[in-house]
Structure formats: C-alpha cells, structure tokens
Image (cartoon, rainbow, N blue to C red):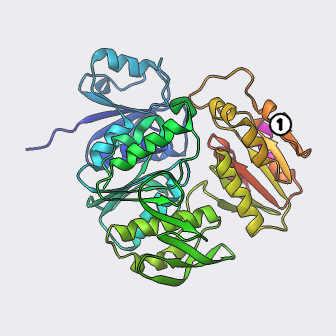
Amino acid sequence: MNRVQKKYCFLGIGGIGMSALAKYLFEHGERVMGYDKTPSNITEQLISMGIPVVFEDSISALPKDFRTADTQIIYTPALPKDHSQLNYFKTQGNNIKKRAVLLGEVTANTTLFAVAGTHGKTTTASILTHLFAYLNFEFTAFLGGIMNAFQSNFISNGNEYSIVEADEYDYSFHQLSPDFACVTSMDEDHLDVYGDQSNMIKAFQKFADLVDQKVVMAKGLELEGISYAIEEKAEYFAKNIHPVKSGYLFDLVTPGKVHDGIYLSAIGRHNLSNAIAALALLEIAGLPMEKALPALGTFKGIYRRMELIALENKLLIDDYAHHPAEIRAVFQTVTEFYPDKRNLVMFQPHLFSRTQDFMEDFAQVLDPFDEIVLMDIYPAREKPIEGVSSDVLLERIKNKNKRKIMDKDFHLTVLQSDVDLVLTLGAGDIGTHVQKLKKNR
C-alpha cells in the first residue's frame, strides 16, 4: 500500500534555515512548495529540484491543491504579521508551525549536535559537518550557510546524527533536544526580542539546560560546560599559532594529549576558534577526533564567510559580518594576513533595530579601515525607525575617508577603487551584488 504524501507550504522558503528543511522533506518524499518575497540563488536551486516557489503574497498565487486545510504550514518568524497567505491558513485552521518547531521534530530521534552563539554558528557547524563527512558518518546537517564543498546548506548522508544551528532569534533554539551542544558567543544582539543582554544570556542558559549530554563553550561565558579557546589555557585550546598563506598551523591541546602541527584551511582567528569548538564537540561525543584532524586542511569554506575573490587588480573578501564583534574580527584578520594592503570596507547595515542598538559600536569598529563606504540599511523584516539611517552612522565615523553610495554604484565603486583589498560586509543583499560582480569579472 502506497504511503500518502503530506503537503507542506513554506512561507519564507528562501530563508537559509527554511530552505534546508524544505529540501529535507522533499528528499523524504513529501510534497513541498513555498512562498518568498524575492527570487534568489536559493529559490532557483529549490525550483531546479522540483519544489515550486511563488513570489506573490496572494491566495491566488498558491496552487489550488495547496490551499486546502490538509496542507501543513511552516513559517519563519521574520514574516510580517499582515502576511495574507499566513492569515488565510490561520483562518482556515491549517496545522501551522514555526520553522524551529519542525527542526526540533525532524532531529528528535537522532543524536543531535546543536551549535549556538550570536556568531560563529555557521562556521562551527560547517566544520563539524566537514569532519563528519570525512569520517563517513551517517548524518544530516541543517546549516545557516552554503558550504562550498557541497554547494548546499543541507547535507544528507543518513539519519544517525544531526548537526544543526541553534538559532537564538525568537527563542528558536528552545525547540531543540540536543545530545551535545556548543555555545560560541553570547554577545548582545536581537534586543528587539530580548530587551537586554541579561535576558538573552538567560535564554542561552536555558538552551544549555536542554542538552542531554555535554556542552562545549567558549572560555569565559556564563555557562557550565567544557571550555575551549585559542592562545589561552582551556580544556581544549590552540597554541603555537602560525598564519600561513591561506590558514593556520597550530598545536591542539586536549585534556588527554597535545596534537602537533595541525593545518586549518581558513583565515581569521575567529575561524580557528570555531574549528577548536568543532573538534571539542567531536571528542566529547566519544567520536574519533584525532582521525579527523587532517580534514581541517581540506575545508573549502562557506559562501560569504571570509570568502576570497580575486579580481583583476585587487582582492575582494566577502563576509556576512553584520554585528560589531564580527566586523572587528574581520579587521583583525585583515591586519594579520594583509598588513601591507590598503583596504576599503563596504558595509550594508542589517536591520534598523540592530543599527539603532549598535550605532556607536559600528562607528568605532568601522573607523580603523583605510576607506569606508556605507550602503543603505537592509530592512529585512522591519519598518524604518525615525532617526536611524546609514547617513546618521556615517556622521558618527571619525575617519575622513568615508562616503555613502546607492546600490547602483556598487560595481563601479569596487572596480574604480585604487585600493588593494575590498571588504564587502553585511547580512542583507550585498552578497547578491558581489555575485554579479564575480560573474562579470
């Protein structure tokens, strides 16, 4: 007897977390479709797989057989409250779940590795995924970025283990049941949800309490767990760190042994820290960490995470950095690996609320770059906030080599600049501009 396919409609299917779940259900034989506001590389990939995507928020845009009451609705909290399709399904009485609830359900019967933190989640989870793939484990990974080696944010190689990013936005990570977890950072963020950092830290502590086995955490966090660090003693730490052309040579100190001469193929000390976290997660779960060490040298990175792009007469580094701490990490990487290159940073602030919360911090972390170019704030799910704009941020930056550009001027700004190194930073659509530039080079 044939199994009856379930029907799923994803509202916000182009989101990085949403698309991974859509791929998972489609691969498991369910009928899947979705809505998103704008076409993207992700929606193109979904359509090419055979998942229909509509870009108009109307009931008539939905296929007729997906408008029925038996369609299960998965939505992102980033969706506006007046979304007509969501409200149609609510009125009709459809089964409606947030993305985080579905992620918790599909990973519940696996050994779950959950990576949390205000930054570092994607790289840590991707390095862990790379290690699992190297060891040929049976696992499924739901990632917040596109791994270059797989050209996907969803890697499916069996169901014994799951690797997920535990997203703190809207308390999403409280829907998970992790066996092992990592917390990379708890810097102030998402104050539109948490109000202040103390509430956010409480949410992370509650997440840690959900972990069945063990928690790995960056040294110094207000949590109970197994610590990791770079260049300072912890239960897992890197020492004798030497930057080489496109990564680091280092020694790894673990509770039981010192592993000498390990190579990581990724620049940025924050990424080295993420690699130590992934290795610690592997070992605390009783898995063969030492056997996986050579895999660090073959890590191919993640789309828009310190991604190096060679242009004719300059190097471009594209990164998702959208928080002051992340921009600071990018600047530290630039000064370590490219101290003699004159640099230009192009920053697209993400969200009015985040720009308002960190206006002074953004001004301070952008100031040390040689030249600064701002783009308009990428609003995502938000409406404008009076008195919050890129123009206001520009005024706060003391560096005189600063200006603001329109989107249409992006390509010429990059190509006509006389600097050696261009950095494009932000979590909005700045990456789309970079991709167009890559195609036209």
What kind of element bears circle 1?
A: helix
Please provide percent x and percent y for residue 56. Answer: 49, 24
Q: Residues within 10 Å of mark 1 (few under 14, many from 20)?
A: some
* Quarter holding residue 224: bottom left
Left or right of 158 in this view: 368: right
**Residue 67 position within the rendered picture, expressed as x and y whole percent measured from the top left:** 31, 22
Q: Residue at x 77, y 37 (%)?
A: 408
Q: Quadrant of residue 364?
A: top right
Q: Is residue 382 above or below residue 84?
A: below
Q: Which residues are magenta?
A: 408-412
Q: What is the quadrant of residue 74 in the picture?
A: top left
Residue 290 shows in this picture = yes
Residue 123 lies in the magenta stretch: no
Q: Please identify the residue farthest to the left as the structure is shown.
A: 1
Q: Which amino acid, by three-letter code, is at mark 1?
A: Arg
258 to the left or right of 27: right
Q: Position of residue 302 (x, y in %)?
A: 55, 59
**Is residue 60 something that shows in the picture?**
no
Q: Which residue is mark 1?
A: 396
In depth, the one of 195 and 126 nearer the eye is: 195
From this view, report whether residue 354 is shown above or below residue 165.
above
**Apparent side of residue 380 relative to residue 388 in the rendered image (left or right):** left
Q: Residue at x 45, y 69 (%)?
A: 279
